[in-house]
């Protein structure tokens, strides 16, 4: 057996030590975070027997709404990567999403896994990287803008009920689509947004220069997204808004299943809080933070403590836990079709 030359051996140098140290730091942060949020997770999980109180039709409706939400995300990624093959998009997204929910700081790890799976399926490396980045910018941009648009709804009256919550929520999503359309189609409104942010930073006494010229930087990022999406950018925007609108409908269905009659504006803000807490990198998928935040904000919205916990459990069951086995199935199906072969061009 030939002995590899010294130059062929991968040196264990500072880069390897940095990776090990970074992994150790993330594991430590995740362990500490899980210790503090464990009571919330245990409180929600301990109500699993009460899922029997929820009629099957509600759980089926929630599952279908989550599939619709994921379908919007698949459509967005398909547009962004210029692919006509749904199989590679769906299986790679399911696997990457599941992986991101079981490893510390999993957002980047999940995106990296999906990128490798798409490349293995024949998507050019540059196209896969740019497409996934553009779709992520749209998804995160919408979820960050949603609380800003939801805040004015607090000024409304004291109406209560899920029908009103649906009207308020989907009205906000319609406004969000219209605002996104204007910002993507025209330069001046986006520059005005950048000027407003920069002016607010100066009024607050910010001494840094990171926000100077933010309008120009926003235009640059917007143009990069448009260059990736082409003329189908409005379809991508519609899919992005649909991704979160169907997710919101899932939460409303969970509340209807437990017989809650909450304050509509606060339900929307509870959903916004849950969506933002999923971005917390300290635990996979915001585990613990979402349960604690959603239960607390639903209680503020007028949902009784027991119903708030049960609604949170049902919502997280279909939006967090069920995608895990789906991701495993996606990884297996993807590997069966594409195997471990090197990337190659594939037909549509």
Image (cartoon, grey):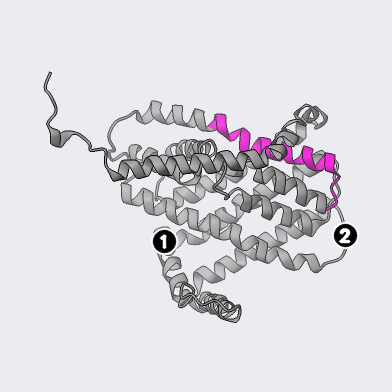
Q: Nearer the viewer, residue 68 or 314?
A: 314
Q: Left or right: 312 with respect to 341? A: right
State the SS at label 1: helix
Does 190 sit above or below residue 110? below
Tag 1 residue? 230
Q: Who is closer to the viewer here, 348 or 24?
A: 24
Residue 313 lies, in percent from the top left, at: 73, 37
Whether residue 114 is visible to the viewer of this picture, yes or no, is: no
| Precedes in sequence: disc 1 or disc 2 | 2
Q: Which residues are magenta?
A: 301-326
Query: Residue at 73% of width from left, 56% of height from top?
Result: 268
Residue plotted at (45% across, 40% down)? 24
Viewer-nearest residue: 10 or 295: 10
Q: Quadrant of residue 257?
A: top right
* CA distance for labels 1 and 2: 43 Å
In the displayed structure, would residue 63 be above or below residue 125?
Answer: above
User: Could you tell me residue 224's position as x and y percent?
Assistant: 40, 64
**Is 302 within the magenta?**
yes
Q: Residues within 10 Å of mark 1 (few under 14, many from 20)?
A: some
Residue at which label 2 appears: 159
Which of the image's four quarters has the C terminus?
top left
Magenta highlight on residue 157: no
């Amino acid at each position: 057996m030939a002995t590899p030359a010294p130059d062929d051996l991968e040196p264990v140098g500072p880069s390897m030590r940095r990776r090990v140290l970074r992994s150790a730091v993330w594991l430590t942060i995740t362990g500490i975070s899980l210790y503090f949020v464990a009571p919330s997770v245990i409180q929600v999980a301990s109500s699993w027997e009460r899922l029997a109180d929820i009629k099957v039709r509600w759980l089926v409706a929630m599952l279908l709404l989550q599939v619709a939400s994921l379908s919007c995300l698949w459509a967005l990624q398909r547009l962004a990567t210029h692919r006509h093959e749904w199989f590679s998009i769906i299986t790679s997204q399911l696997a990457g999403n599941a992986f991101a929910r079981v490893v510390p700081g999993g957002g980047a790890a999940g995106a990296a896994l999906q990128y490798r799976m798409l490349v293995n399926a024949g998507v050019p490396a540059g196209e896969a990287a740019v497409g996934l980045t553009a779709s992520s910018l749209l998804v995160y941009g919408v979820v960050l803008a949603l609380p800003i648009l939801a805040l004015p709804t607090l000024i409304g009256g004291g109406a209560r009920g899920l029908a009103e919550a649906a009207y308020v929520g989907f009205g906000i999503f319609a406004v969000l689509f219209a605002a996104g359309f204007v910002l993507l189609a025209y330069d001046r409104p986006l520059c005005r947004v950048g000027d407003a942010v920069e002016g607010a930073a100066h009024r607050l006494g910010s001494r840094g220069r990171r926000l100077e010229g933010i309008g120009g930087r926003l235009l640059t990022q917007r143009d990069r997204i448009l260059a990736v999406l082409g003329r189908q950018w409005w379809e991508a925007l519609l899919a992005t808004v649909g991704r979160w609108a169907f997710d919101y409908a899932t939460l409303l269905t969970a509340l209807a299943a437990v017989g809650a009659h909450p304050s509509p504006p606060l339900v929307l803000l509870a959903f916004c809080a849950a969506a933002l807490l999923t971005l917390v990198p300290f635990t996979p998928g915001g585990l613990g933070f979402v349960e604690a935040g959603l239960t607390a904000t639903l209680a503020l919205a007028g949902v009784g403590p027991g119903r708030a916990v049960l609604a949170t459990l049902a919502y997280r069951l279909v939006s967090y836990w069920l995608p895990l086995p789906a991701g495993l199935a996606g990884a297996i199906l993807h590997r069966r079709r594409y195997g471990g072969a090197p990337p190659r061009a594939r037909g549509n």
